[in-house]
Amino acid sequence: MGSELQQAEPNADCAVRGETPKCQQDFPIEWEGDHYVSRREMVKFLTLGSAVLAVANWVTVFAKGLARPDSRIVKHLGRVEDLERQDALLFRYPTEQDPCIAMRTREGKFVAYSQVCTHLSCAVVYDKSANQLVCPCHRGVFSVDQGAPVAGPPTRPLPRIKLEQRGGQIFAIGTEV
Amino acid sequence: MSIRSQGTTLFSAILILVATTVVVQLWLLTFSMEALLRREYGVLPAAALASSFLLLINGGLLRYIFRFDHEVQRNLREKP
């Protein structure tokens, strides 16, 4: 009862002074007043949005540490001679839903990448004559050495599959996202 | 130009400035996300610092508005 009286007092003072009480300013009865946003309020909202965007930007700085850890699944791909005979070897890694492509560079190094184009997920193919990975859908081109986009619409490199040679055999041992 | 009209112009200018910096921050965030996916981690701290600097500008302008309103209220109380 006492608290109700205390709450009522400021409004009574306002009525005496002929001002609109604070609660009615914050929550007006009319729709027009309720929908009105002053410049000051807009600046407050925008500054709050600005703070959220700044925090989100810092989150990206620390997100690199939270990136998906490398897959540690080891998969046997075949013998070195088999891959030397073919232009490229298609395999699936780390799951059966992840198509990948392995090939030998002109320097004789074995490399493997995800076969899913980073533009619109078409399958990339190895063009041995040009020594490039080519996406036939939109003519995206990736370098064989790094998997980096060289031409066309893709802007991100192909995820790389780590390979290891043991006793004349090739194994996929992880992915670099 | 009346003082009220000057105030309106001033606050409109502040609003436009804050809105512009927020748009720049939004662009910085999309740029950072793209860089993160491209694994170019070197640009991320620079973009975050730039975004924080723009937040400081916005915070400074908001503080100016609060102080301005506080000053106006005080003057009204002193000279009713």
Image (spheres, rainbow, N blue to C red):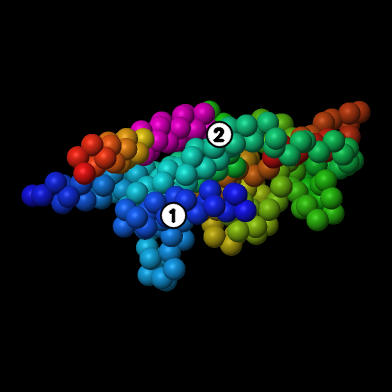
Say whether residue A60 is left or right of residue A33: right
Task: Determine the residue positioned at 82% across, 31% down.
Answer: A164
Q: Which mark is residue A11?
A: 1
Q: Find out whether residue B59 is within the magenta segment.
A: yes
**Element assignment for label 1:** helix
Task: Determine the residue positioned at 64% across, 44% down.
Answer: A158
Say whether residue B62 is left or right of residue A174: left
Q: Position of residue A92 (x, y in %)?
A: 82, 50
Q: Position of residue A168 (x, y in %)?
A: 89, 31
Task: Determine the residue positioned at 40% across, 32% down.
Answer: B56
Which residue is identified by label 2? Answer: A58
Task: Determine the residue positioned at 15% across, 51% down.
Answer: B5
Q: Position of residue A120 (x, y in %)?
A: 60, 58
Q: Give the mark toward the camera: 2 or 1.
A: 1
Say whether residue A64 is left or right of residue B54: right
Judge the density around disc 2: few (<14), some (14-19), many (≥20) Cα neighbours within 10 Å.
many
| Image-quadrant location for residue B36 | top right
Judge the density around disc 1: few (<14), some (14-19), many (≥20) Cα neighbours within 10 Å.
some
Q: In the image shown, does A159 or A108 lie closer to the viewer? A: A159
Q: Chain of mark 1?
A: A
Q: In the image shown, does A140 or A7 lie closer to the viewer? A: A7
Q: In the image shown, does B13 or B72 lie closer to the viewer? A: B72
Range shown magenta: B44-62
